[in-house]
Image (cartoon, rainbow, N blue to C red):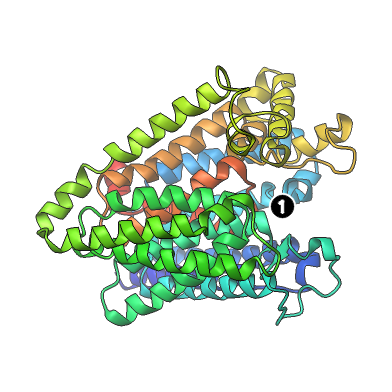
Amino acid sequence: MKRDKLLQRWSGVYLSALFLLLPLWLHRGYFDITETKTVLFAALTLLYLAGVLFGLLAGGSGGRSPGRGALLFALFAALNILSSLLFGGRDALLAANNRYQGVGMWLLYAAMVCALSAGGKFGKWQARTALGAFALVSLLCVLNALYIDPLGTAVGLRSADRSRYLSTIGNVNFIGAYVSLLLPLAMGLFCLGRSRRELWLRGGVCLLGAGALLVGSDCGILGVLSAAVLLPWLLRREPRALRRLPWLLLLFAAALPLFGRLLERGIGLSALGRLLSSLPVAAGLALLGGALLLFARRQTDEALSALAGNYPVLPAALLLGGGVFLLLGNTLLRDRLPASIARWTVFSGSWGSDRGAIWGHCLALYGSFGPLRKLIGGGAGCLARYDALHRLFPDAIIDSAHNEYLHYLLTSGALGLGAWLGALAAALRRVLSPEGEDAALLCAVAGCAVQGVVNIAQCTTTPLFFALLALLWGSRGSREDS
């Protein structure tokens, strides 16, 4: 029993180190940032796995069983490894042409997930290190966006790149992914805070996170908004947390326009960021927050929980309405929509910074696969190899589908994508019975899963995402499913 406790503590140390160091660690600034974070993740994970193995050899039981989600993830990783070994050659071992998501990384991912789902826990120290690192990253995002460079990371960058590489994450798309994971986590933990000190500190993290949200790419806004819509339902069993949601709305009502005005003097904002930080949106958030605050004061805890339990009707209606609008916007109303709306809703080759063209290119690659590759994929780097022979853009090689699910279809096939979606579903089904901090973890992984529709798996956020999923797969609900 003592050995099992030691293994749990060792997992806690690993999680704290991972969430603290991986986002912040740099070597030569942005010039080797991907390699640096890949090496750091590998070093931390190998050390963690060595400790787990030592504990098992010393007689520990290894904790609880991994759970169905972790087993599906192991299958997903195995299919990525198999297809890479069969079709990728030596380059697929590290897969620099696949953002370093190669055979070696998938082995580490699978081992980490199985170990964490069997013995990991997201406690107060893991929350503190994760939110502390996020606060520092967010602060640096805002400072860099104002052309203040305390770490000297922008030295040597071209002026055109000053708006694309920020903080200790680098690429703004990667910042968007990181924010979509950590800001929803901070929001959930703020609502679940047990003391006034925790509320102030976590509220401060959310405040800084609002700045990073506006600085990062629009994928981060997509993920955070999706997680925010889900949050009231996740907290339905925590009446005290529900009463803090209005304060969260009021915080963002103040922070978003403040950072918006500030950042417009620096690198500027995207059209979506400008809309989100506009005064009408801020006024709407303030009115909604104030109304909910007054409403919640008049309700009993039981009434609040009951209302939150029926809440999914609203986002379901919004989702259905949005789907119908997208269908009409791409059919009957395609040529009638104003340009400001059509740029977001009408799909074409140029949609989403050329993502429409990239997705069509990727589907052409998948269509060219034989039966075996359609099932297990073309392995790490298959898109870069295809694009080198069938160039989509003359000035760049496309090495990512800019849609994680489509990219996994290419690298691990229909079987791999199915295993990944099944693993995600095994974690997200916990929304049916969230308990305590699991609500914050679910909010985080939901935000990151949504932004993956338009973003890239990479070496900073992806390991953190998988780690949180492993904790959900190993929690009470997953143990019952295993």
Left or right for 240, reference 289: left
Residue at image position (66%, 18%) is 371
Residue 392 in the image, given as x and y percentages of width and height: 83, 33
Which is nearer the eye, 40 or 21? 21
341, above or below 193, in the image: above
Q: Is residue 37 left or right of residue 178?
A: right
Residue under the point 26% across and 74% down = 194
Answer yes or no: is residue 65 visible: no
Closest to the observer, 317 or 295? 295
Can residue 74 be seen from the camera position used here? yes
Where residue 388 appears, as percent x and y from the top left, is 87, 35
Q: Position of residue 323 (x, y in %)?
A: 46, 28
Q: Quadrant of the C terminus?
A: top left
Q: Residues within 10 Å of mark 1 (few under 14, many from 20)?
A: many
Q: Quadrant of the N terminus?
A: bottom left
Label 1 belongs to which residue?
Answer: 100
